[in-house]
Image (spheres, rainbow, N blue to C red):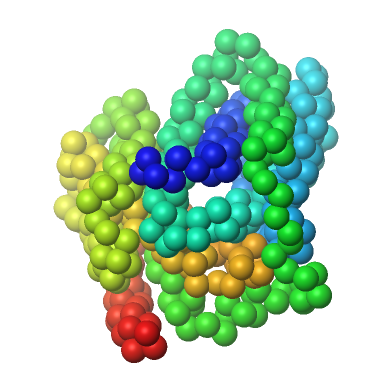
Amino acid sequence: MRAPLANSEFRTVWLAEAQSVLGDQLTTVSLSLTVYHRTGSALIAAVAYALTFLPALAGGLGLSHLADRYPRRTVLVVTAAIQAVMVAVMAIPGMPLVPLCGLLVLARLAGSPANAAQNALTREIFTDDELYLRSQDIRGITTNTAQLLGLAGGGMLVTAGGPSWALAVDAATFAISAAALSRWVRPRPAAGDGNGAWHGAIRWVAGQQRLRVLLGLSWLVGLATVPLGLVAPLAAEIGASKEAVGWLLAADPLGFIVGVFLMSHYVSPQARRRGLAVLGLVPTAILVAFIARPSLAPALVLLAAAGATGAYIVTVGATFITWVPNELRGGAGGVYRTGLRVAQGVGVAIGGVLAQLSGSAATAIAVAGGAGVVLGTPLAMRWHRVLANEHTQR
């Protein structure tokens, strides 16, 4: 993994993304706590938390195309500067809740083309497939680590200094990112000529069977994330303490970090691509074991194992971007990222419905796992055919 980090451009993009993710988690915690303290309503606080996701879903399809129409470094610098200003205004003490939430929506909306530009620019930086995949391994590890640290540290920072300090830190991360990207990433021309249809990438992806299969494999993650929405009732059901809720929440992302690290070190890119069919089924297959209603320790092991095997999603995303023409990678990356987010949100919602109907969080998790195996098996077969076609064409 040292090879990608030897590239100064990638180091800049990587560190800018990592600190921005860390700062975003501080903002998420600050907003949730601020809304709850001012209103005393858990429902309103939950709605405010949901606002941190909705702009990414809308902007993923509507604004990602900007990463193809304009130079990607410019997109990254401008969006980081916009977010720095908006979050800095949010940090003003006593900011009313409605403007506060409105600024958050606009700031997250501005981040959508930045996410698309990061993925596409990294593929431009690394023309070698293996180096590019390794770079995505590093991004996967650091992003999940930054999310964990941000959520954990956000509560302490808000408690110690107040939400305005946490928001100020987030604004500073965006300002630093804009300056670093402008200084250490070299300018490149826009990948597209600007004459294509606004949603041309969406139509192009829809017409590619191999990309549709990759999208399907990525959507299986939605069922694998069902436990994250049920950790509180699961802890109560298996007789665990309230403190165990945090452990159950952390098990999956920690497992993911370990899984990406091991795959990057010990499995070749070719073997990872060939193994996607099997790896896509394993995370949900592991969840079927929750039908036995395991105690806390086995439950933590199962969730960590599901997270570790869920590291296959890095290979899915890297392969998807690699198979898209450079001039469409921004818009296509938005399709991929939006589909993944929607699948995760729908998966958590389905888990809640299943838990309500069955009266058991463990049963709901097991049913979701079984559904993942059933839905993933045809995708695995289609992936084998895709690889066979790729081999024939070569």
Residue at the location (50% across, 72% down)? 323
Percent of width and height locating residue 73: 70, 49
Asked whether the viewer can see residue 379, the reply is yes
Percent of width and height locating residue 204: 62, 80
Q: Is residue 176 left or right of residue 136?
A: right
Q: Nearer the viewer, residue 74 or 302?
A: 74
Residue at the location (58% across, 38% down)? 12
Residue at the location (33% across, 38% down)? 254
Q: Where's the N terminus, which quadrant?
A: top left
Q: Is residue 179 above or below residue 323?
A: above
Q: Nearer the viewer, residue 327 or 375?
A: 327
Q: Is residue 204 above or below residue 315?
A: below
Percent of width and height locating residue 385: 33, 85
Asked whether the viewer can see residue 51, the reply is no
Q: Nearer the viewer, residue 325 or 46?
A: 325
Residue at the location (79% across, 39% down)? 82
